[in-house]
Image (cartoon, grey):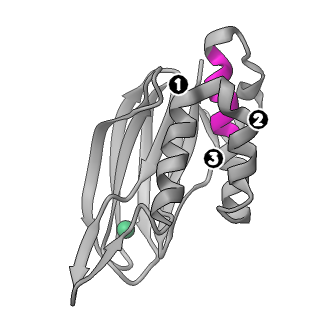
Amino acid sequence: MKGHDLDRRTVLKGGMASLAAAAGLAGCTGGAQSGNDSANGSGGANGSGGNGSNASGTPGASDDRKVRVVLNEWQVKPDAKSVPSGQVTFNAVNKGHEVHELVVRQRSDDGAYEELDEVDDIGKGTSKKLQMKLEPGTYELACLIVEKEDGETEDHYKLGMHETIEVAN
Ligand SMILES: [Cu+2]
């Protein structure tokens, strides 16, 4: 698993040149992830003029830019794949059993993610809102909680708690 995560990071940094590799990796991350990985690939193409990716999730986005994000073990599920830029309100709903958090990170040109804001300590059955102004780009919604119990590490991100979302023009 560890090696796989490293590979994935390399793919993101590689951008366009690694599209084939990204497609290959999608196969080992499970069904729910494959759409995500291909979205990452087309995001990488933006620098060279490819913007066909914007159309994909737009019909699901509402005018008031509210995104409901369901958190559980071990998924982050936004109800939209794409939102228009501007003021966006994320409503993070914890439908799992453990405490989770919602971190919003923006992907930079080199593929690295930069944290913008977060709401943490979202208990079981509760929700928290996070309002922020977003410019067009690719963002990641993630839970970065890492717990250690009896020598075992539970890393929510590595277990699958991350999803990308596109902010369109
Ligand atoms: Cu979590």
Q: Residues within 10 Å of mark 3 (few under 14, many from 20)?
A: some
**Closer-to-camera residue (118/127):** 118
- Asked if one can make out residue 65 in the rendered structure from this viewpoint, the answer is no
Instruction: Identify the residue at image location x=54%, y=57%.
Output: 4
Does the residue at mark 2 contact the one at mark 3 (Cβ under 8 Å)? Answer: no
Q: Residues within 10 Å of mark 1 (few under 14, many from 20)?
A: some
Query: Is 41 covered by the magenta stretch?
Result: yes
Q: Amino acid at mark 3?
A: Ala
Residue situated in front as seen by the camera: 122 or 9:
9
Q: Please, which residue is most extreme toward the top here?
A: 49
Q: Nearer the viewer, mark 3 or mark 1?
A: 1
As for residue 43 lying within the magenta part, the answer is: yes
Residue reaching furthest front?
3
Q: Which mark is residue 56?
A: 2
Q: Which residue is mark 1?
A: 137
Element marked by disc 1: strand
Give the residue pinned by disc 3.
80
> Which residue sits at x=73%, y=28%?
53
Question: Could you tell me which residue is drawn at 49 percent across and 72 percent down?
Answer: 74
Q: Quadrant of residue 127?
A: bottom left
The kind of residue tagged 2 is: Ser
Q: Nearer the viewer, mark 2 or mark 3?
A: 2
Q: Using residue 122 as the reference point, say whether residue 10 is left or right of it.
A: right
Lower sequence index among marks 2 and 3 = 2
